[in-house]
Every structure is written in C-alpha cells, then in structure tokens.
Image (cartoon, rainbow, N blue to C red):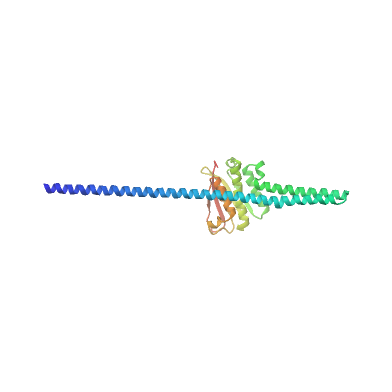
Amino acid sequence: MQKLTDNFYVLLIIAITGTFILVLSFVMLLLRSQKKLLAQREQIQHNELLHQKLLLRSVIESQDAERIRIGRDLHDDVGAALSNLNLIIERFLRIPYSVDSLLEFKQSTRKSIDQTIKKVRNISHNLSPEVFTLNTLSEALEELCDSFNHADHITVDFNNDAETVLNGFELNPALSIYRIVEELITNTIKHADATEVIFLIAIEHGAVSLNYQDNGKGLNTSDSLKKGRGMQNIESRLGLLNASSNIGKAAFGFSMEIKIPVHA
C-alpha cells in the first residue's frame, strides 16, 4: 500500500513538473512570437516612415527643380525677349525719325511682344495647364493625347470609361493625374522608341484604374525605371494621391497600372 502511495506521488510530481514545463514552454513561445511580431511591426512602421520621407524628399526636390526651371525659363526666354525689346526701343530712339523707321519700329515691337507673350504663356502652361481653366480633367487628358498624336510621330489610343468620376477630382489631384499621364507619354517618346501607346481609364473596385502600355523597347528591371527623374516625379505624385502602381514585366514594351482611390 505504501509503495502504491509512493508511486502515486512520483507520478503526480512528474505530471505537475511536465505540466509546468509545457506551460513555461508555451509562455516562452508566446513571448517570443509577440516579440517577433512587435519587431516586424516596428520594421514595417520604419519602412513606411522611410518611404514617406523618400516621397517627401522627392516632392521637395521636384518643387526645387521646378523653381529652378521656372527661374531659368524666365531668365533665358522672357528676359532675353525683354532685352531684345529694349534694344529695339533704344535703336529707334537713336536713328532719325521717319515714316519708314516708325513702321519698322511698330512691326519689330509687335513681333517681340508677341514672342514674349507666347513664352510667358508656355511657362504658365507648365505651372498649370490652361486646359483646366476651360475643360474637365477628361477633356484635358483627351486634348493632351491629341497633342502628342499631332506632334510626335506616335499614336496615343485613349479610351476613358470613367469620365464622371474622373471629373469629380479637385484641382490638385486632377493636376497630379494630368502630370502623371504627361510624364508617362513623354518618357515613352524620349526613351522607348515606341510608335503606339494604349491608355485606358476605368473604374475597378471603387478606384480609378489607369492602364498604360506602349510598344517600345521596354525596361530590363524595375530598379532601372526608378533612377530617372521622370519616374521619381511620377512616384511622388502617386504618393500624394495615395495611389498604388504595378509595372508590368512583358517581354517587350512598357506597361503600368495605377489605382487611384476615388476620394484622393
């Protein structure tokens, strides 16, 4: 009887010890899992913060580059045109007055002023396309595609199935969408040796879907794409729109799909 009692206590101690070890192991695994999960969350937050910093830096660099470009355009184009106008006036004041000199002065002055107005208008267009003052975003994009069709030996096939939603965007996001499309087509013309662009806009799962594809020489890797200033500008504008993008990996040509939340 005593022996049975002793065996019972031994088994009880083994059971309690085993249970304690199992509980302790479970707690350790739980703590390790929570620590790992916390580390992963911190890494994700760090990556998101880093990404936001990179986007912000890209936006600031783009704004600085835009200011430098505007300053250069004002100096080189408008400044030169005004200097030329000043020379015309000084020349007229130095020569003897005559009907012919007055006629030449009027013609030269009018030509110089017209050129200055055109250059100022071009700079203004680069800041905010004048099509937005009269047209909707859909009409502005259609006009943009038509302008490339007529000027750059390339066919841009534009199909818009989201006019109502697209035209509901406010000015800033609308301008970002316009600039993204403009940059994509410009990159195709400059680097892709393409002859055709297919550009589709539709509504998918509550978001505006922009599908862009050309028949050019394409890219080797997505990393090489991000090195260009143009694509950095696109990336920063996508960030401002809270949009997502996916670059296709076709054997030839370049394709990009962009998803823009309707509330952007």
Residue at screen point 12% across, 49% down: 3
Residue in front for this viewpoint, 134 or 5: 5
Residue at screen point 63% across, 56% down: 190
Q: Residue 191, image x and y in percent?
A: 61, 57
Q: Total of numbered circles in the picture?
A: 0
Q: Residue 241, image x and y in percent?
A: 55, 45
Residue in front for this viewpoint, 55 or 190: 55
Is residue 247 found left or right of 93 in the rendered image? left
Is residue 22 found left or right of 198 in the rendered image? left
Q: Residue 124, image x and y in percent?
A: 68, 46
Residue at screen point 79% across, 48% down: 110
Residue at screen point 33% across, 49% down: 29
Residue at the extreme left of the image, as rendered: 1
* Quarter of the image with the C terminus in it: top right
Residue 210 appears in the rendering: no
Q: Residue 95, image x and y in percent?
A: 86, 52
Residue 61 appears in the rendering: yes
